Image (tube, rainbow, N blue to C red):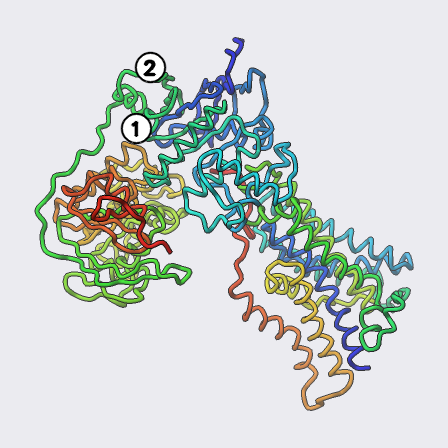
Amino acid sequence: MFVSFFLGSMLRSATPILFTALGEAYGESAGVLNIGAEGMMLTAAFTAFVAAASANSLLVGVIAGVGTGIVFGLLFAVLVVTLRADQIVIGVGFDIAAAGLTSLGLRVIYGTAQLPVLPSREVVDIAPLSSIPVIGKAFFSQDAMVYLAILLVPVFYYVLYRTRFGLKLRTLGESPMVADTAGVNVFLMRYIILMLVGAMAGLAGTYLSIYQVGFFRDDMTQGRGFIAIGVTMFARWNPVGVFLASLLYGGAESLAGGVQALGFLRTIPNEVVLILPYIFTIGGLVALARRARLPPALAKPYRREL
Amino acid sequence: MMSDAPGCAVRTVGITKRFAGVVANKSIDFDVMTGEIHGLLGENGAGKTTLSSIVSGYYQPDEGEIYVRGKLVRINSPKDALKLGIGMVYQHFSLVPRFKVVENVLLGLDVAGQKTKDLRTLANAITQRSAELGFSIDPWAEVSELSIGERQRVEILKVLFRGASIIILDEPTSVLAPVEVEGLFRTIKSLASQGRSVVFITHKLVEALEFCDRMTVLRSGTKVGTLSKSELQSTREIVQMMFGAEIEPTATRAITRVGDEVLRAEGIVVENDLGQEVVRDVSLTLHGGEVLGLAGVEGNGQKELAEALAAIRPLKAGRILIGGKSISGSNPAEQYDLGVAYITDDRVGEGLVRDLSVSENLVLKSFRRRPYRKGFVIDWRTVEKETDKLIEEYGIVALGPKSIVRTLSGGNLQKLLVARELSSKPIVLIANQPTHGLDARTTQYIHQKLIEQASQGRAVILISNDLDEVFSLSDRIAVIYRGEIIGLLPREQATREQVAHLMVGLRETSGGAQTATETS
């Protein structure tokens, strides 16, 4: 029983990280570092909640969240691709702005009143797989977003490593000049990729607010955007690796939750247990990503210059 | 408007391009015929690369027209150029080192409107195509594993697969070993015989004369003239066109009497950044007043050796003595104080700081010393006075001591670097590719400076892959191949052919036949 609960919770904890990290893997492979992922997730979590609450529909919430992500991605592209602003500065700016704006928005819209209650998420049972003992419930009785995240993994992998679009995308991160002289529109490609990066962060934020907990709370992303960036580097931009690393993070988070809920090891303070996923991320990064070879063009604006 | 002669592949009319107010191309008319090898000559900054970048769509001209096969075209991007069959092989290759050969070729195929192929089919086609051109390349090799010459072949294949019928090569020989140059010439000739047009950019006159059908000379952004092979009377004429005045190649330096031993390296082993041993058991001695030429194809350990001598890179084994004293464990600053100056081959990466001023760059190594140091601060007044003096002495074109180094041209950057290193009055001077990519005038100036150093009793190590340079300046010639000194000869006993062969690892055996040394 505990194992089944743990596995299911691991998948749900991994889902938002997975969405964001898949997007980041594409962005970074194309030479754009989106430090603003945290802010994009948080804003999307907020707009998804407001939209879902007012329309009383989770689908409307998803559309709003993804739309928010795309708008952010587009804005990011205008600033860093066209105006060649520093990607780190703009990204951090997004994070700070998002924290303030969502917090303000929440109070403006709902004041001090109770937050509205959302329709509950629908669990999709995949029969007969869901009746397999132990793992059935965990893997085949989840909401649609979890399935979507997992299905996107092979799609992202295939496109990145097996298609021309993927080859061009990776070339942008290696050398935009090579891509340019090969006739690839560097600017257009980066715009498209950044909108995708935004959309993925939007999905992640949406999942956090309207699927995982059903409400919005100040700073509810709690650094997950940064963890996703870490996961991406840890996995060296490989979507399959991103999936596995997200699962590890999800495992750590649900373990922390489980230890807390079941009241094991009462002697250890809660805070210490809650730190687990973050310690895991830092440890993983130090151990593995230390030797990672960053895409040479990462975070560098491109202009034609011989 | 005049109509194009039949067989004209590309023609430009009145091309003008300015960069931040500086005219790089001024009303240039230029044409290339089908099946022709057309040399584009001129010194650095003459506008050769700008003109070809305009034709290949990387830059857009401010004024002027381009005709391709008689039709007026607008080339707004490299993509447009590819569609018109124009392909450029850039000086600094446009390959992704981490990708396989076949992936590099695939990139951009669809943009050029070529049929989509799967990787396997494309790989077979690469093998076949390269055989036709007289070389072989493994399509599944990662580009980073290939030699410079092989990478260039991949570049050429890449533009061919994109369907280019007009191929522009930007200074293709500057990175190659002498033996590789011959191979490149054969490839280019076979391309021309297939009816393709080749534009060959160079500042090496001998190459252009050897195999171009026609030559166009540019000087400070304007076209001086176009000559066909038959019209050419003498090389002097074309030199005059390129420089406006005659420049004699550096005369072979008389061998000098050498002084005391100043540097000795004993069995040194050095690793590169990846931890591979790239200098293996090298021993050498250096005497005051001599020039030791270290010839080698790039990437055979000469850079790491130079860095070890300058104490930038630690020794894995062996020791270095300067003036009889072991210097192991000293850092670059201490080495500098001991009198070792290092002219790096990476001018703006390692040598100079792009965004600092000329005077700041000049005191970068000597600010700890008097008279630049005044208590805890730098005496900028003295620094600037000294900078003014050096700018004048070395003829550096800059707006003054405060101008930012980024704004200087390649030749002036190198003069600045040389000025800084020589002004420290070193005992040992290590010059790594000191004239790479420079025009004849600056090259000659740098050569004179090096000769001057030796005649003042300093020891000079000249690292170069340019045989002319090595032969005209050195007293002794050492050849480095795969991290080992495989030949060390007094200049008067060395022949060019011998050194050229040693550079690619061919050692003469007793029977006179040549064999490759240990293949690993």
Q: Quadrant of the C terminus of chain B?
A: bottom left
Q: Is residue A304 left or right of residue A203?
A: left
Residue drawn at x 59%, y 52% is A87
Spot occupied by residue B292 in the image (x, y as percentages of width and height): 19, 48
| On screen, residue B486 above or below B75 | below
Spot occupied by residue B41 in the image (x, y as percentages of width and height): 37, 26
Q: Is residue B229 left or right of residue B487?
A: right
Viewer-proximal residue among B365 and B208 = B208
Spot occupied by residue B398 in the image (x, y as percentages of width and height): 33, 37
Cα–Cα gap, marks 2 and 1: 16 Å
Viewer-proximal residue among B343 and B409 = B343
Viewer-proximal residue among B345 and B300 = B300
Subunit ID for the residue under disc 2:
B
Labels 2 and 1 within one chain: yes
Callout 1 crowding tier (Cα within 10 Å): few <14, some 14–19, many ≥20: few
| Residue B520 seen | yes
Kindly identify which residue carries mark 2.
B230
Which residue appears farthest toward the bottom when viewing the image? A267
Residue drawn at x 54%, y 71% is A287
Q: Is residue A177 left or right of residue B311?
A: right
Spot occupied by residue A53 in the image (x, y as percentages of width and height): 88, 60
Tag 1's secondary structure?
A: helix
Instruction: Give the image quarter of residue B227.
Output: top left
Q: Amino acid at mark 1?
A: Val
| Residue A117 seen | no
Which residue appears farthest toward the front when viewing the image? B511
What label sits on residue B206 in the rendered view?
A: 1
Subunit ID for the residue under disc 1:
B
